Amino acid sequence: MRSAVAMLPGLMWPRTLRSRIFLILLVGLAFAYGLSFSVLYMERYMSAKAVMLGTLENDVATSIAVLDRLPAAERGDLVDWLSRGNYRFELGPGLAGVPDASSKGREIAGKIEAAVGHRFPIRIERIPGGVNRLQAHLMLSDGSPLTIDVTPRGVMPIAEWLPYVFAVQMALLILCTWFAVRLAIRPLGRLAAAADALDPDKDGPALSEAGPSEVAHAARAFNAMRERIAHYLEERVQILAAISHDLQTPITRMRLRADMAEDSPEKDKLVSDLAEIQRLVQDGIAYARSAHGSGEKNARIDLSSFIDSIAYDYQDTGKAVKVVGLVEGAAFTKPHALRRILSNFIDNALKFAGSAEISVGHDAEQHVVISVMDRGPGIPDDMLEAAMQPFFRLEQSRNRETGGTGLGLAIAQQLTAKIGGSLRLYNRAGGGLAAEVTLQ
């Protein structure tokens, strides 16, 4: 079925589901309410008109009969008494008018003619002017002229309080519609928020299963899906850890046998390949451990001493690692996990740029931000997010010749989540990459 937008291209259709449901319900209920009000109004209008016309016929018939029987000298005393709000009697020929062809005029003329009957010939005319006014001219039995001046009024006048009641009813209708839409959309909003916050690596609260049966069923299904995803990821990491662990023994035997062999170019190639396999296995075990967490407890560290110790360890081995800027303050975090994160950043910088710089600062919310920067080739912007996935490599700059396994950033991301921080990669102005971890 085509949507309303496709059927009515000129219609400004709201973007949100909440607004669309609210608009549909409000328009539908307002239309139904207006239709009911119109039907009721028409029914009362027709009933009131029938009563008025019937009363007019009876009153006019009685009044003419009374005036016809009275002597001409006494008729003037009763004319005002017999008159009503929408018609009055005048003794005389009245005013000159024109034939009236309106439906209301024909109805009134018909009732007056029915009241007079065939005893008195009658002529009904419309008096020109700004006011809707009719006059019926007739002759009484003694030949005296009599005029009935009719000024039709609204059959059912609207009370002064009716518009206020209508406004209150419409406000109540809007309020009830808004409440119904809010009640229906709120579970969908909670489900969307839970889906956005879904992170199998973190133990977040389960989605509330309270509410109507349909909402509770959807919440239970979402929680079950969340548990299955976490279970599948845990199984994947366990398989990786088991394979990596079991490979260490045969790799070690092969390494010993290679070391015992005679020196040759083939031996050197074999030893190099075994070293690369061993690094891959060790990184796989490290990734599995980072996914499960080490159980390390938080501790307060002095940032200046902590960062300097990391830089000195690399400088002692001849690596170009330095601390830029002033480092001060303290942080409450998992020291070994943070050291592994920064070491992975520094290792990447050394592999692809030959040097690394460490800086410590604070963001707008005064969270500690530690950055490791280099002047290497960087990573294309459209691949920054993918670079943190396990076993990811860039074809040109990050290949097996560099000794990378594609797990360094993935391990850093896992550990960052375990310490409750956030990780960000971005390309520096002027070239190079910056890896930034924020401690929260």
Image (cartoon, rainbow, N blue to C red):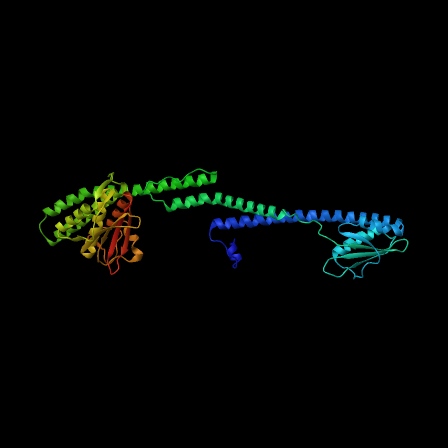
In the picture, the quarter occupied by the C terminus is: top left
Q: Left or right of 368: which side holds 111?
A: right
Residue 41 seen in render: yes
Between 23 and 261, the one lying in front of the other is 23
Between 231 and 410, the one lying in front of the other is 410
Q: Please, which residue is most extreme toward the left here? A: 262
Residue 244 seen in render: no
As drawn, 189 above or below 152: above
As drawn, 83 above or below 10: above
As drawn, 439 above or below 210: below
**Number of labelled discs?**
0
Between 371 and 15, the one lying in front of the other is 371
Q: For residue 256, which quarter of the picture?
A: top left
Residue at the image position 15 percent from the left and 51 percent from the top: 272
Image location (x, y in percent) of residue 425: 28, 53
Image location (x, y in percent) of residue 145: 86, 56
Between 3 and 179, the one lying in front of the other is 179
Image location (x, y in percent) of residue 176: 53, 44
Image location (x, y in percent) of residue 171: 55, 46
